[in-house]
Each structure stands twice: as C-alpha cells, then as structure tokens.
Amino acid sequence: MRSLSTALAILAYANLALSQTAITINTASQLQQIDGFGVSQAFGRATEFQAMSSGPRKQGLDYLFST
C-alpha cells in the first residue's frame, strides 16, 4: 500500500513538472498606463537618509520619488 501511495505521488509530481504554461502578451491592446513607481522607507530605512549630508540626501530622495 505504501509503495502504491509513493508511486501515485511520483506520478502526480511528474505530471506537474512536465506540464507547460503558455503566456501570451498582446502588445496591440493597452489596458493600463503606469506613470512612475513609488518607494516606501517604512521599516526603519529612513535613518540611512537622516545620517547623510543634505546634498546626497536630496539626490537620493529625488532619485527615489521623482517621475
């Protein structure tokens, strides 16, 4: 019984490993336009910017938050 369960598990895994997924990208259809991305410094990373002098701090923040 145990060998049958093992064989079924192997066959199920092999079937998943051999299956293929097809992805189609239609470049003729525009669904959504994205205008820039944002960044969160929510988990204590702001201290890295606070320790900088004003020039590099402004440059880093402009790089992260400007569009």
Image (spheres, rainbow, N blue to C red):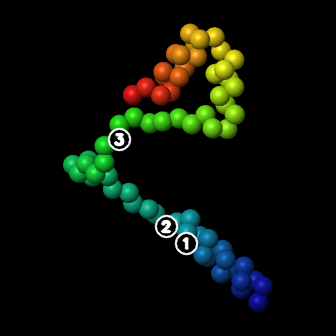
Mark 3 surroundings within 10 Å by alpha-carbon count, few (fewer than 14), some (14 through 19), many (20 or more): few
Position of the N terminus by quadrant: bottom right
Q: Nearer the viewer, mark 3 or mark 1?
A: 3
Q: Is residue 40 left or right of residue 22?
A: right
Q: Identify the residue under disc 3.
A: 34
- Callout 2 crowding tier (Cα within 10 Å): few <14, some 14–19, many ≥20: few
Residue 3 figure quarter: bottom right
Q: Is 28 placed above or below 37 here?
A: below
Pick whichever, 45 or 27, lies toward us: 45
x then y, percent, for residue 38 = 48, 36
**Numbered disc 3: secondary structure:** loop
Q: Residue at x 62, y 71 (%)?
A: 13
Residue 15's disc is 1
Q: Are circles 2 and 1 on residues that touch, CB within 8 Å?
A: yes
**Which quarter shows the C terminus?**
top left
In this view, 28 is above or below 51: below
State the separation of the CA atoms marked 3 and 2. Answer: 33 Å
In the image, what residue type sits under mark 1? Asn
Q: Which amino acid, mark 2?
A: Ser
- In the image, which disc is placed on residue 19? 2
Residue 42 x %, y %: 63, 38
Q: Residue at 69% across / 34% down in the picture?
A: 44
Q: Residue furthest left?
A: 28
The type of residue carrying mark 3 is Ile
Q: Residue at x 61, y 76 (%)?
A: 11
What SS does tag 2 mark? loop
**What is the spatial separation of the Cα atoms under label 3 and label 1, in whole angstroms?**
38 Å
Name the element at disc 1.
helix
Q: Residue 59 has which mark? A: none
Against 20, residue 4 (above or below) is below
